[in-house]
Image: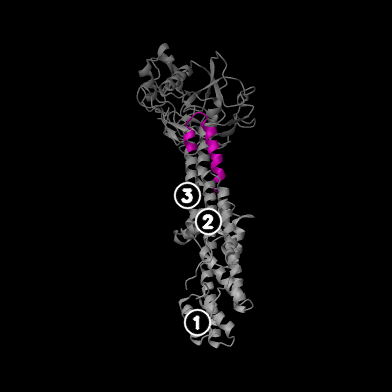
């Protein structure tokens, strides 16, 4: 049936109605306040204002029978064509006029009842389309006006009027919700669009307009979540998603958004981790890296691997620079080749010196003191070798003390003593013969050792030096607290180092008068470096093979010693400290705390050195 308008609707409202009919409605997951509000801007009152009453058309009927028959025929045709109430030729006005003339006109009564049924059906059709179509709501109101005028007490009319009221209420709820959406008043925690939409959906579960508006709220909440995530506020992002998740739980929109935001979080975490790692190489890098870590921890889940990695790298940078504990490396030298192999010693703390009740201990090893290394350092894996020292001498022309004075102390096999021998310098072994390149360099003074370290520093661009006493003992103990690195007793594990063993024999068959009983290492004299197992920190031969120069000046005990691990040096001192046992040392000199003085120009067949490098 064609429903004719009874008033002139303002052009803007007609245009909006056309928009509502013709606009493409976006998918629910792409819904937005603009999409939900662009097509419906009038209130339910405006939609029904023109249909508050129906002015029944006046129908004039002649008294002749043929005129009455013609009126009845016109009413039937109007009923069939759906022309129910507008104009004097509409079905309802004609049937009413016929009944006014003859209240007993059964045909007119039946026709009017049929018109009522058809009118209510048309009204229900209009109501079904009235959710987002203002023309449909207007038509429903026109039907209501006709039904109210003609059948005011009819149960069908009353039921229909209730349905119209319900449609008006739904329209108004959606309109107000759309106004809230336009102002970003979503109502997730109070007044706004959501309470109105929930009320609308209680009245009409699944109503398309309300569901579209609900999707728009969901989209707005997701946008808030993504905006928060883009700024790094993933806590707020999660809260917005929680609000959105309850709106349409059967739709994948929020789970998809969670995945997107999770990817945003992952990418941001990775970016912060990379920024932190890159910062470590720059000025004030540790502070900058810590700032990136703090930001990362605010958004990462507990135990996040990227956070753990950056924290570990910062910790390593604090304690080791760009290295890791246990890492072995060499530095390139400016003149060509590479420096000695270095191993990174872990930071930590230990008790330096010997307790008073340790067998063989002396006052020089006391009082014990606690030393802490807040930063690791690198120590040469082995003693400096003849080959290492040769590169230094060839590059610089340096003359060692023994070369300048023309002699050093060597071991004499015939007498079993250490004797002075001419023409012995750094190139020679413990007997005075030319040494192999992999033998520890001997016959070098403390000054000669420091000169080599200075050359390494110049060539590599890093600071090399002799170890301090504290560094030497810390590396020798490698976490142990016993008298010897291997324990407290004289029972030495097999292969632990080049020591004076009761099973050792010289080429002529000599034995040590004071040795570790039952131990033999196969050497009478220094062994090639790294011939024995390294300690747990990767350093060879600290307790044996050759004793070694350290940077400290000699002091009779540790009273007033520095509180840290720096060398204890007095300007102009000529007596330095020797650490670590040698191939010809008494067993007590292989203890971890053992120390002895020597003039800085001392050279002999039992004494060498190694270097450390700052990280």
Marks 2 and 1 sit apart, C-alpha to C-alpha, by 48 Å
Earlier residue among tags 3 and 1: 1
**Which residue sits furthest top?**
405
Give the residue number, with chain letter if any, for mark 3. Answer: 263
Residue 94, placed above or below residue 320: below
**Disc 3, SS:** helix
- List x then y, in percent, for residue 134: 53, 63
2 vs 1, front mark: 1
Earlier residue among tags 2 and 3: 2
Res. 287 visible in picture = yes
- List x then y, in percent, for residue 397: 37, 15
Give the residues in magenta.
275-301
The reply to whether the C-beta atoms of the residues labelled 2 and 3 are less than 8 Å apart is: no
Residue 269, placed above or below residue 21: above
What's the image's color scheme? Answer: one colour
- List x then y, in percent, for residue 583: 46, 28
- List x then y, in percent, for residue 152: 63, 76
Determine which quarter of the picture holds residue 7. Answer: bottom right
Earlier residue among tags 2 and 1: 2
Res. 242 visible in picture = no
Give the residue number, with chain letter if any, for mark 1. Answer: 71
Closer to the camera, 419 or 427?
427
Give the residue number, with chain letter if any, for mark 2. Answer: 37
2 vs 3, front mark: 2
Using the image, tell me which numbered label, if any, was put on residue 174.
none
Closer to the camera, 507 or 206?
206
In the displayed structure, does residue 416 sit left or right of residue 49? left
Closer to the camera, 286 or 151?
151
Marks 2 and 3 sit apart, C-alpha to C-alpha, by 32 Å
């Amino acid at each position: 049936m064609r429903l004719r308008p009874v008033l002139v609707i303002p052009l803007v409202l007609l245009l909006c109605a056309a928009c509502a009919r013709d606009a493409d409605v976006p998918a629910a997951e792409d819904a937005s306040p603009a999409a939900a509000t662009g097509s419906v801007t009038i209130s339910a009152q405006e939609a029904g204002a023109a249909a508050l009453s129906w002015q029944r058309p006046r129908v004039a009927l002649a008294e002749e029978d043929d005129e009455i028959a013609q009126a009845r025929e016109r009413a039937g045709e109007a009923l069939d064509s759906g022309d129910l109430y507008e104009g004097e030729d509409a079905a309802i006005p004609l049937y009413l006029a016929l009944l006014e003339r003859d209240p007993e006109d059964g045909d007119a009564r039946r026709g009017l009842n049929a018109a009522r049924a058809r009118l209510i059906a048309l009204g229900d059709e209009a109501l079904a389309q009235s959710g987002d179509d203002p023309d449909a709501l207007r038509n429903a109101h026109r039907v209501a006006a006709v039904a109210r005028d003609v059948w005011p007490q009819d149960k069908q009319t009353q039921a229909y009027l209730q349905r119209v009221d319900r449609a008006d209420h739904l329209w108004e709820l959606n309109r107000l919700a759309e106004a809230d959406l336009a102002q970003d008043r979503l109502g997730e925690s109070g007044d706004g669009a959501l309470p109105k939409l929930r009320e609308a959906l209680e009245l009409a579960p699944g109503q398309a307009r309300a569901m579209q508006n609900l999707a728009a709220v969901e989209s707005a909440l997701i946008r808030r979540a993504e905006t928060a995530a883009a700024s790094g506020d993933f806590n707020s992002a999660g809260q917005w998603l929680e609000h959105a998740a309850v709106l349409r739980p059967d739709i994948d929109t929020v789970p998809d958004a969670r995945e997107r935001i999770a990817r945003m979080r992952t990418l941001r975490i990775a970016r912060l981790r990379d920024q932190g790692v890159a910062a470590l190489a720059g000025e004030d890098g540790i502070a900058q890296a810590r700032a990136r870590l703090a930001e990362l921890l605010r958004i990462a889940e507990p135990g996040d691997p990227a956070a753990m990695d950056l924290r570990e790298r910062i910790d390593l940078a604090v304690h080791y620079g760009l290295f890791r504990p246990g890492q072995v490396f060499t530095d390139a030298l400016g003149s060509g080749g590479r420096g000695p192999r270095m191993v990174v010693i872990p930071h930590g703390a230990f008790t330096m010196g010997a307790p008073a009740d340790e067998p063989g201990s002396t006052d020089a090893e006391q009082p014990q003191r606690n030393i802490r290394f807040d930063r690791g350092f690198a120590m040469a894996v082995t003693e400096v070798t003849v080959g290492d020292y040769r590169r230094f001498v060839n590059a610089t022309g340096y003359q060692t003390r023994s070369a300048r004075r023309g002699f050093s102390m060597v071991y004499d096999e015939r007498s079993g003593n250490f004797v002075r021998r001419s023409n012995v310098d750094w190139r020679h072994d413990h007997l005075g013969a030319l040494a192999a390149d992999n033998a520890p360099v001997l016959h070098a003074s403390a000054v000669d050792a420091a000169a080599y370290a200075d050359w390494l520093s110049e060539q590599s661009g890093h600071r090399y030096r002799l170890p301090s006493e504290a560094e030497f003992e810390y590396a020798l103990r490698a976490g142990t607290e016993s008298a010897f690195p291997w324990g407290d007793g004289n029972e030495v594990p097999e292969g632990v180092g080049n020591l004076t063993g009761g099973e050792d024999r010289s080429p002529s068959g000599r034995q040590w008068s004071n040795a570790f009983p039952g131990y033999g290492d196969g050497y009478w004299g220094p062994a090639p470096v790294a011939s024995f197992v390294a300690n747990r920190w990767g350093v060879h031969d600290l307790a044996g093979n050759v004793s070694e120069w350290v940077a400290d000046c000699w002091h009779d005990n540790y009273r007033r010693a520095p509180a840290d691990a720096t060398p204890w040096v007095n300007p102009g001192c000529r007596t330095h400290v020797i650490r670590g046992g040698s191939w010809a040392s008494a067993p007590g000199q292989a203890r971890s705390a053992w120390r002895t003085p020597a003039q800085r120009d001392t050279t002999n067949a039992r004494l060498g050195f190694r270097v450390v490098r700052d990280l």
